[in-house]
Image (cartoon, rainbow, N blue to C red):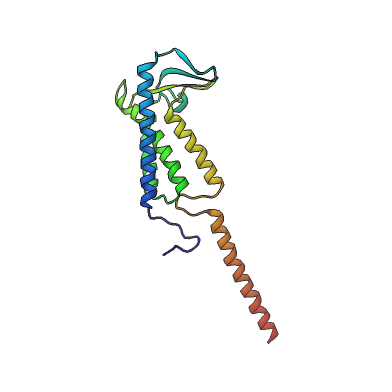
Amino acid sequence: MQAEAGTPLTHAHPRRTTLIFLVAAGWLILDQATKWWAESALTRGESVPLVGELLQLHLTYNSGAAFSLGTGMTGVLTAVATVVVLVIIWQALRTRSLPWALTLGLLLGGALGNLTDRYLRPPGPGRGHVVDFLALPNFPVFNFADMGITFAAVAIVILALRGYLPDGTREVAEKDADDHTQGAADRHGTDRAAEERGR
């Protein structure tokens, strides 16, 4: 049974929800594994060219948000990030769209990557510093969690601009359906008026 045009689909799609958590888990593992490697292989403060001067490895610890923003607000950022993760999980349980499932999975994985550092790394739970080790010219040092968050943010903008909704519907399609229904009603009203005049 299909929903009528324009009716939002609010029930979860089990495969989409599973996909979100699989993508999130994969990205979280990638983020934590690369951070572990960076701490074991790099010396803090020293730069190691990876792709010439374009991309370097530079181990540092960040008490702020993504890309070293908001340093000195670690506790507040941890609380905000925790709420964001809970909101993403809530949305994941309602998502039916494949593009949105991939996007939310990436966003959740990135958020969990840095949040894991906040809770488990020194100087203490909720105040932990995030491991960053990827450096571009004239750009803050970052990690794979930051990349996941950034890629997801770009994807969200694209999906929003194209009218794709997390519930599996599309705003443009709904508008076209409404226009079609309205047009049919207008034509019916015109035909009926013509019949009345012809009597």
Task: Identify the residue shown where x is 54% and y is 17%.
Answer: 53
Farthest residue to the bottom: give it: 199
Image quarter of residue 174: bottom right
Place of residue 91 in the rendered image (x, y in percent of width and height, measured from the top left): 40, 46
Q: Is residue 18 left or right of residue 151?
A: left
Task: Identify the residue shown where x is 41% and y is 33%.
Answer: 110
Q: Is residue 116 left or right of residue 68?
A: left
Count of numbered circles in the view = 0
Residue 183's place in the image compared with 159, above or below, is: below
Task: Identify the residue shown where x is 45% and y is 18%.
Answer: 57
Residue 189's place in the image compared with 136, above or below, is: below
- Quarter of the image with the C terminus is bottom right
- Quarter of the image with the N terminus is bottom left
Residue 108's place in the image compared with 71, above or below, is: below
Residue 163 in view: yes
- In the depicted view, which residue is nearer to us: 32 or 108? 32
- In the depicted view, which residue is nearer to us: 28 or 153? 28
Place of residue 159 in the rendered image (x, y in percent of width and height, measured from the top left): 52, 45
Residue 87's place in the image compared with 168, above or below, is: above
